[in-house]
Image: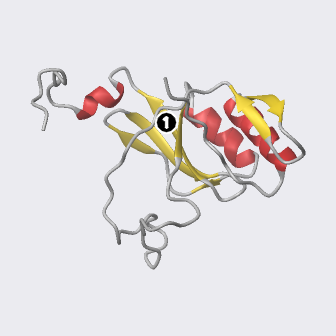
Amino acid sequence: MKEIRICIDVDDLDRAVAFYCDVLGLTPGRRLGTDWVEMLGATAPIDLLGTPSGTAPLPTNSSMRRDFSRHWTPVHIDFVVDDLDATVRRAVGAGATLDREVQDRPYGRMANLADPFGNGLCILEMNSRGYDALVDEPEDLEARPRG
């Protein structure tokens, strides 16, 4: 099995440790030198999101456009929590920025934020169907013809 590690660049390591502990309940693991702390307590699924190049990533800044050539943050992280409102309050109280109002989605509720270091993240509170709510009919992936 492959292991996925998510690396988040920050300019204040101690503040980042506090943010991810206090807001999302992660815990410090190993300290790997003076500028690296391993945070534990989350899984890391990868969701591939099809978003056209050239579209605006934020409704508040229409001059900014997505560019899928290499740049500092072409990926964001989604954290699934049990209480979206409480998590957003903790995040904003700890220095995060709410990019837009909390949204109702077919799969639950979502908040788009930037952590105190400018890294984009989403906080999700799934409903009972989760992402299955986006699928009209469950597909049998094993029966699908392969190309």
**Amino acid type of the residue that numbered disc 1 sits on in the rendered structure:** Leu
Placement of 75 over or under 22, stated as above or below? below
Taking 86 as reference, is 59 left or right?
left
Horizontal and vertical percent position of residue 11: 80, 58
**Dot 1 crowding, Cα within 10 Å, few <14, some 14–19, many 20+:** many
Residue 83 as seen in the image, left or right of residue 139? right
Residue highlighted by disc 1: 124
Q: Who is closer to the viewer here, 103 or 62?
A: 62
Q: x and y percent of residue 33 in the render?
A: 88, 42
Q: Which of 114 and 40 is in front in this view?
A: 40
The residue lying toward the viewer, choosing from 85 and 115, is 115
Image spot of residue 77 (x, y percent): 54, 44
Q: Can you name the residue that lies furthest to the right here?
A: 34
Q: Quadrant of residue 130?
A: top left
Instruction: Please tell me whether residue 28 is drawn above or below residue 19 in the rendered image.
Output: above
Q: Residue at x 59, y 64 (%)?
A: 72
Q: Is residue 123 left or right of residue 133?
A: right
Question: Element at badge 1?
Answer: strand
